Amino acid sequence: MAAYLGACSPSEAPPGFLRYNEPEGIRSLDPVQAFKKAHIWATRLWAETLFEVDSIGRPIPHLCSGYRWSPDRCTLRLGIRKHIFFHPDPAFGPDSTRPLGASDVVFSLQRAAEHPASSWLFSAVRQNAEGSRWVRAEGDTVEIILRQPSAAFLLLLANPQVSIIPPEPLSYYGENWSRHPVGTGPFRFVAWYPEQLLIFLRNPRYWKKNQSYDSASIPQGVHIRFLRDRQAEIIQFLQGQLDFLVGNERAYSVFFLDPEGSLKQDLKIPVRLEKGPVLNTEYLGFNLEKDCLPCRSSSVRRFIAASIDRPHLVQYALEGLGIPADASLVPYSLRRHTVPFLSTTPPPKPFQLRLMTTAPYALQGALLKEMLGSKGVDLTLGLSDQATHKTAVANGEFEFFRASWIADYPDPENYYSLFYSAHRCPAGPNYSRFSHPLYDSLYVRLTTATTPLEKFTLMHRMDSILQNEMPVIPLYYDIQLRFLGPRVAYLPFDLSGNPDFSNALLKREILRK
């Protein structure tokens, strides 16, 4: 740490560092709080999970060396990799570090299971006589007992909220431990200047070796700025002080893209544009417990859905930065079938409907008003701020509303959970208050499906029900913009749009300049 701080001022990163900005800021590095982008990205630098998710959404053992299910798929036994060491820290005493063990896994999982922000990840885990979740160590093995089979449970163990941490720093630093994180990840914590920057150094003892190439090298550290102004962020990027920008911010598209959605040719530095799908679906929802005509009639809901020109909406409201949806809420990257919108006869007479949305989506609302108006639907728009809108949707105050769903984990089950009657808000994310006994039984079967054939057969049947009932109207699936600066040779992103810092590479010839 002293060597780093002596090499340059805190606001400057050495040449071998990967540098990015986090406009949302970061208040804590406690993994159980890692449910927003800013926190997730930072947590993935220093902490690791038992599993990770591959490019097609499958759980792959990570800190876990292997696993085995019992015949009834209710007991999971996990082996823990050996010879993995925590980052050096005074919390470990004279030895400064120690190897990862099964007891650390039990400590981390039990802690996450008891925390309000992450306890939902363990809803399938059985409780023991003391009321704690059934997670225990047996030698070098960890045993987890579920109440019932859960097909997505291994994916839940890949969530950064379930990162494995040692107990010593919590005791050593007390309430301030979340500002002194200690894990096993590719980078280790160095310094935190609140509201300014966060610094991590490469972990020289990292167990998972990255392949270095002649023309590129792995970053020696990560330097995170906290500029809240987007224009200042763009200027820093163009001046070569930041290495990448990620997101669909309007400021990015206006500055970097031409009307066709391609990079402008007159940028001050070489910029590489990447576009990747992310697990986020924007949709219109009905509260089926209200008394308006569409809330009472599935045929009217199907009529409205079929009246929306999604390619036109994406092209003019998003400048092409989205994928027009079909009738399924599940993004294409998580399924193998298409679900067309069903045609239906229009209602016998025009009707009125009020769509509640927020200011950033006002243009989309205006386009929807125009499209539906030509079909005899008198659509009016109501605007509210994001917090008020979110609360009102959860409380069931609106008949018709705009919403979105970002997957908590990369499995179709997460999207189908929005229509399970037991998840009727506030007990869960069923904001439409949809209830269908057959759908419920299929959803329960989906959560325990163990083969791809069984899973996709159930998805087809559930999509058929939703296609006919149309409790929500999918509009488009998000695309993420990624602007990579000239120093970046390689920076992969996962299905959720998170960068994989452990496999990042910087261009060596540019670093020498």
Image: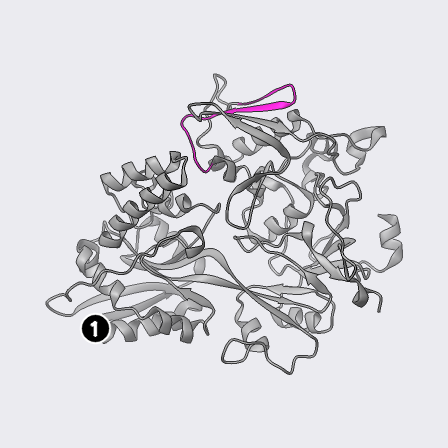
Q: Nearer the viewer, residue 287 or 20?
A: 20
Boundaries of the magenta span: 135-152
Q: Which color mode does the image show? A: one colour
Residue 246: percent from the left, percent from the top? 59, 63
- Residue at (29%, 60%) from the top-left corner? 340
Q: Nearer the viewer, residue 26 or 136?
A: 136
Is residue 88 highlighted in magenta? no
Res. 427 visible in picture: no
In the visual, does 334 lie left or right of 294? right
* Amino acid bearing label 1: Lys
As displayed, is residue 37 above or below residue 73?
below
As displayed, is residue 428 above or below residue 448?
below
**Which residue was labeled with disc 1?**
375
Is residue 139 highlighted in magenta? yes
Res. 313 visible in picture: yes
- Residue at (31%, 69%) from the top-left corner? 381
